[in-house]
Image (spheres, rainbow, N blue to C red):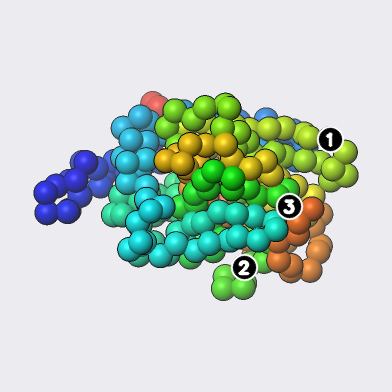
Amino acid sequence: MQLPDGKLDTDSCELLLTIFDSPHYSEMAVTLRDAFQSARPFPHIVIDDFLPASVTEIVATAYPDPNDRSVRWKSHKNDNTSRKFVEDVRFMSPQMRLFAQAVTGRQFLLFLETISGIDCLIPDPYFIGGGAMVSGPGDFLKVHADFNWHHKLQAHRRLNALLYLTPDWKSEWGGELELWPKDMSALGKAVSPQFNRLVIFAVTDDANHGQPRPLATPPSVHRRVFSVFYYTTRRDDAEWNEPHFTLYKPEQSPYGMSLLEDYQKTNKTGNR
């Protein structure tokens, strides 16, 4: 949905920037927060058909092309992983940049705080280690615990949100996100990267996850996931590990709390 001169039309801009203003998301967050907290092997939630079809179509159509050499792709290719991603929004389409603003904005932060129970979340505007990610035939990501410290934000990593954006994903291609318990005794859960599926999970040194099985997609198909990571200036009370890279294998202010309470009261009969 783009005008001939390359500018976005007004309707598309408004749709992308205001998507999380809908009371649908505050109601969803309140409904799902208990399921998030009680999930095993660690707190998480899987939400299907997360975005309206109109928004998903815009974002999926505008997703970076892994064959586009004008895009500044970063690659991770070693014994632990094979994939590439765009974390610099300057090399994303206008549609993707607007979506990136939406998932780092106030309403989505309140949505995540409500579901997770983690207050005072800080988005990463740099998309360090995340952003528009793709993996193709043979690519993988071994099971690991994420890095826990953002050196630019000087904050502790607390939450991941992953939105899958490959249309018509087929089960025979693999690509499941695997969630494993602390002792790695048995696979806890496998989540297929189905189109328009959002996965949110808490980040601790026990939150082992990955996509360890090499993809079996056709050469023209890539596993696309837009990944956003969220931080706080406080550690989790139960998580006292020192800052580290990826591991393979106080009372809140009254104003801050009122924002969250107000968001959770939003419903279809009255916007606040």
Q: What is the x, y in percent for residue 137? A: 54, 43
Q: Which mark sits nearer the N-terminus, 3 or 1?
A: 3
Q: Residue 150, labelled with which disc?
A: 2
Mark 3 or 2: in front is 3
Secondary element at tag 1: loop
Q: What residue would you read off at disc 3?
A: 144
Q: What is the x, y in percent for residue 49? A: 46, 28
Name the amino acid, label 2.
Answer: His
Q: Which mark sits nearer the N-terminus, 3 or 2?
A: 3
Question: Which residue corresponds to the image point at 17% horizontal and 53% vertical from the top-left?
Answer: 7
Q: What residue would you read off at disc 1?
A: 186
Question: Which residue corresponds to the image point at 56% horizontal and 73% vertical from the top-left?
Answer: 152
Residue at the far front: name it.
219
Separation of marks 1 and 2 at Cα, in angstroms: 30 Å
Can you say whether 218 is above or below 135 in the image? Answer: above
Can you say whether 87 is above or below 117 in the image? Answer: below
Name the amino acid, label 1.
Answer: Ala
User: Relative to residue 31, is residue 59 drawn left or right?
Assistant: left
Q: Residue 258, labelled with which disc?
A: none
Separation of marks 3 and 1 at Cα, in angstroms: 14 Å
Q: Is residue 136 visible?
A: yes
Name the amino acid, label 3.
Answer: His
Q: Is residue 256 visible?
A: no
